[in-house]
Structure formats: C-alpha cells, structure tokens
Amino acid sequence: MPESAVLCTECGYNRKTRQRVMVPTAASGAIGASAAVAVPAAAIPSAMAGYAATVRRHGGADNEVEPPAWKELLVPSILVAIGVALQVFNATYGSDGFISLGLALPFLGLKLVINLLFAFAGVAIIVKYMEVALGSVGPAIIKLVAVALVPEGVATLVGTFVGSDSAWVRMMVSSMLFMPIGWFLFAWLFDLDFLEALYFEVIVWLLQQWVGIFILHAIFSGGMGAGSMTGIRGGGGSQAVSTEDGQAREVLKFNRVTDAKPWVIEGPNRMVQRLGHDKTVALVSGLLEAGAKEVKVLPGTAEYKGQAVAMVVLLPRDAASRKKVFDFHNDWTDENGGEDKTDEGQKYLVLKWGMF
C-alpha cells in the first residue's frame, strides 16, 4: 500500500495500531469496483486510537512486526534505573566526597519532577502538532522517563569530570553532549526518523535546560547545583542546608581547591581578590584561630596571577565554636567590607570575589 496510507484495503492492516481488522473479500460481494470497504464497526478503532500506537515502520505491512519485548520494556527499564542512579550521583558528588542522600533529596526530588513534567509536556506538543504516535501507553511512559533522565545525567557526569577545574568547560561539555544523546534515544527507542527525533529532543532540551533550570534557581534563590537547598530537616535534629552549602560544594568540586594557609603564605602575591596579601593572611589565620575546622581557597586560573576567587570555611559542630567563628567573621567584614553571616546550621561559609 502507499507509504502515506494508514489502512490497507486488501489485508486490513492498520499502520498506526499495528493490528489487522476484518475486511470482507471481493468474492463475498462486499467489495466492488466502486464500493467502499466494509469493515465491521466493532473492529474499527477510534479516530484517536491510531495515534496511541507506535509510529510507522518502513518496509510495508507484511514486514511490520511487533518490536521485541527487550526493546519495549527491558532496555527502557534498565535505562530508567541508570538515569536515576546518575541523577543521584550528580546530586551528591563533590570533590570533598559524597554528601548524604538525605541532604540532597529535596533538591533532587524537585529537579526530577520538573524534568519529567517538562519532558512529557514537550513530547505532548510534538505529538499533537506532528501527529506522531509513540506506542502503547505503558512502554511509552517508561521510554520517556528514560529519555528525560539519561541524557542530562550522562552529560552532567562527563562535564563534571572533564571540566573539574573550570565551570565554563563543565557547562560547555554538558551542553554539547545533552542533545545528541537525547536525539539518539528518541530515534532508537521510538523508531523515529532524523527530523522527528530532532524535534522531540529540541523541545525537551529547551524546556528542561532553560525553563526548568530557571524555575529551580528561582525556588532555591540562586542555588548552584545539587546542594542548593534550604530548610531541610533530617537526621537527629534540625539542620539548615542553605544555598551557601550548595555553593560551597560547587566550589569544592574544582581540582585546584587547596588549603588556604599554606597557599597564602607562599608569596606576597597570594591573596583573595581585592583584599591584598596581608588582609588575606589575617582573615585565614583568624578563622582558624576562632575554631574553623578547615579553610579552603579556589585559586584563579593563570590570568589571576596568584589570586583566589573564592574561600570556603568548614564550620565546627559545637555551638560555642561556631559562635566564635561567626563573631570573628562579622567583625572582620564590618571593618573590611562584606556581608555578615548568620548561623542557620549550615556546614560551610562561602566568601566569593569575582567569577569562578
């Protein structure tokens, strides 16, 4: 039958539903030269049923077979599991080790919900306007979940390691990988042609990577990455995991992060931007003497010539020591400029100057 046809008038095969319906033969007199095809009403699917089935398969009706179960259910299910694992890993991994899943869960959960919602919304738009069907509801949902999770998960993972010392490299690598992986999964899982898969992936990419990220940043007040969360309660008591903790984990992912004290005393050109060497030494020494467990700096790249662009302070646990650190910090910023910090139970203090 013609490539554009949906129903074969000879054998009753429906390209959309991939099922055969009863079609009386010419010998029975039901089909004449000018007669319409007589198909029992009960055997005719609804007008919308065709769009609930898998998209066309090339090669003619006789060659069209049900896709193997491993491609319809097994592989998509495995991909979903891989996608979830990647999302969890990306949300909890940092250069200082892994944070607990409990701390990452609020941000991770909301991110997954937003990504899935926008992926399904993007697919619905393309299905409506291009009249492309994606198959049986159950397998199609599993496949869409896989496509929503795996490309972003793989792209972020590779970007994290390849661009471990550069946020720009990390972002570019992730962006370049996201769309090709998504296009491949759409094309292979749903048997789409090049342009159909491209349309699906472009819409999903725009919604997830632009609208979705904008919403997440708005909710978490400029959060940066997996740890950007506020007001989480877990474990044995109340613990505020603030935007500052998320920013700290992002800084600590860079391989060039180092201990502040030995770094700053190596030479007079070692300083945090705008502070100068002497003030940087005083700040680092004062924080450590006040009770900070660690003080790390993120040295800039070559063009910064010995200047650090961010400082991360690991806070002590006991209340008295924490108060000393906060008091010292706030007294220091009152004298030298900067924002006062409030103890909200966070793990880190982050002092940033410039871009990193």
Image: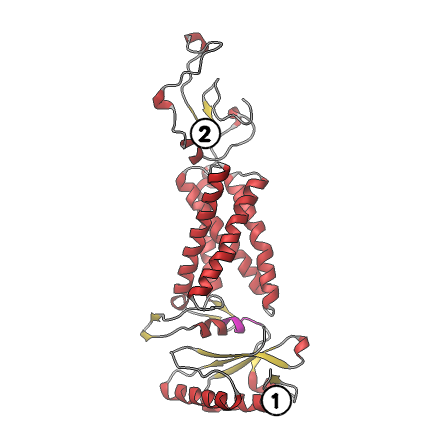
In the picture provided, is 210 more to the left or to the right than 234? right
Q: Find residue 257 and report its image quarter.
A: bottom right
Please say whether residue 288 is visible from this viewpoint: no
Vertical order, 9 against 288 (above or below): above
User: Of the residues shown, which amino acid type is indicated by label 1?
Assistant: His
From the image, state whether disc 1 or disc 2 is nearer to you.
1
Residue 158 at what x, y percent from top left?
57, 60
Count neighbours of disc 1 (C-alpha within 10 A) and say few if under 14, some if 14 to 19, many if 20 or more: some
Q: Position of residue 261 (x, y in %)?
A: 56, 87
Apparent side of residue 179 relative to residue 71 in the rendered image (left or right): right
Estimate how packed mark 2 is, as few (under 14), some (14 to 19) or many (20 or more) residues with alpha carbons within 10 Å.
many
> Can I make out residue 299 in this image?
yes
Magenta segment: 249-254
* Place of residue 145 in the rendered image (x, y in percent of width and height, measured from the top left): 44, 49
Is 102 or 182 nearer to us in this picture? 182
298 shown above or below 215:
below
**Residue at 49% across, 42% down:** 126
Label 1 close to label 2 by CB (< 8 Å):
no
Q: Is residue 241 above or below residue 127?
A: below
Q: Label for residue 329? A: none
Q: Secondary structure at mark 1?
A: helix
Task: Write down the residue under mark 2.
Answer: 18
Q: Which mark is residue 277?
A: 1
Coordinates of residue 166 in the picture (x, y in percent): 60, 69
At horizontal 49% and vertical 35% (from top left) the residue drawn is 55
Q: Main secondary structure of the magenta part?
A: helix
> Which of the image's four quarters has the C terminus?
bottom right
N-terminal-most mark, 1 or 2:
2
